[in-house]
Amino acid sequence: MKRRAFLGMMAGAAVAAGAGGVFAFLRQEQFGALPEGEDMRRILRSPHYADGAFHNLIERPVLSDNSTFAGALLRSLVEERPNPAPPAPVPSKKPDLLSRDRSENFVVWLGHSSFFLQMGGKRLLIDPVFSDHAAPVSFSTRAFAGSTPCTAQDMPDIDALLISHDHWDHLDYPTVTALKTRVGLVACGLGTGAHFRRWGFERERICEADWGDDIDLNGVRIRFVTASHYSGRTLTQNKTLWTGFMLEAPGCRVFFSGDSGYGPHFADIGKKLGAPDLALLDCGQYNERWKYIHMTPEEAVQAAQDLGAKALLPAHIGKFALAYHPWDEPFRRVTTASQGKAFRLVTPIIGDVVSLARPLPEFPRWWEALAARQA
């Protein structure tokens, strides 16, 4: 959940319950926990942690205009957004993941930044959000109609649950707790494991890592890579590390940016780890004030080129209205920016099974027919 949505929620909670009620509200289990005790020892050794917080490689403010709390709150409450949601349900389908042969390599976009991947005989789930909202209250940050065809019960047993960071639109408490008995390993950035431990996940099932670390799943290597973002489930920020992932299996490499602004880290990752067959890149929630923590569609295209990606699948898109642009603008802009580029743009509907066999298939521009109903 971005600051705009959280501030709106906080304002509503304060009016309804007063300061004491807000304090009690923030103590709910869904807010997780901050790292402490022995968890802090490894964090303190990280080169990306200093002065009580994690830092991006390039130090830049979260908001490019250095907005104050009061200014951000006022803007969130009064600014109008054009066409924030589709005029009809988003097209989607429920994939049959339970019966798929484990030898198949494929990816399924599950809306926003949620992805199911099967590669190297392993089943991976990234940032799953199966709730109909991405906030601690159900009336905030509502999912578009039709954009949540799956539930936790539709998932097979998961070898590794990958969490890029702890914002509400990436780490969904009802979803991950519903999956608790079906997840072999939780892979997340340093500090993020404190949330899972509060929620009843055993310590031995949680692997917290720093940028540059990797995990061997005996068939798939999970590499933790740099992202330019921030973290926090309340206004206490940057106590946990945000991350991207490079996933490697024999004959298959998939990159997931997590939430990230554009920067030289994409070219560095491509040079160090090699070109991905498919890049899942943040490009759907952006504005000038967020330019250091999210990419525009044009920047995502440049990032795909920097990585040397063979294909680009847009992420952080198609399910929630977190920014101020029309819901379909990211699809239109990434399509235009991708024309004539060396990679293939892949735009499945939510729930499509996309084979990772080369070449990746092309898909129709499903958003155009949906947007036409708004005209």
Image: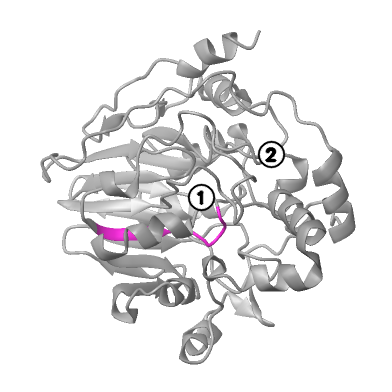
Q: Against 133, is 14 above or below? A: below
Q: Nearer the viewer, residue 330 or 351?
A: 351
* Residue 38 falls inside the magenta stretch: no
Q: Position of residue 314 (x, y in %)?
A: 48, 34
The answer to whether residue 74 is left or right of residue 349 is right
Q: Residue at x 57, y 24 (%)?
A: 337
Q: Nearer the viewer, residue 88 or 169?
A: 88
Q: Against 78, is 201 above or below? A: below
Which structural element holds mark 2?
A: loop
Q: Position of residue 318 (x, y in %)?
A: 52, 32
Q: Amino acid at mark 1?
A: Phe
Which structural element holds mark 1?
A: helix
The residue identified by callout 1 is 266
The residue identified by callout 2 is 323
* Residue 165 falls inside the magenta stretch: yes
**Is residue 369 in view from this perspective?**
yes
Would you call the spot at circle 1 few (<14 residues within 10 Å), some (14-19), or many (20 or more)? Answer: many
Region in magenta: 159-168
Q: Nearer the viewer, residue 270 or 254?
A: 254
Q: Against 20, is 286 above or below? A: above
Q: Against 175, is 78 above or below? A: above
The answer to whether residue 147 is left or right of residue 203 is right
Q: Residue at x 54, y 50 (%)?
A: 169
- For marks 2 and 1, the one nearer the N-term is 1
Residue 175: give its label. none
Q: Amino acid at mark 2?
A: Ala
Q: What is the distance, in whole Å, between disc 2 and disc 1 at their CAs?
A: 23 Å
Q: Nearer the viewer, residue 226 or 238?
A: 238
What is the residue that sits farthest to the front in this orientation? 17
Q: Between label 2 and label 1, give the one nearer the viewer.
A: 2
Would you call the spot at circle 2 few (<14 residues within 10 Å), some (14-19), or many (20 or more)? Answer: some
The answer to whether residue 215 is left or right of residue 113 is left
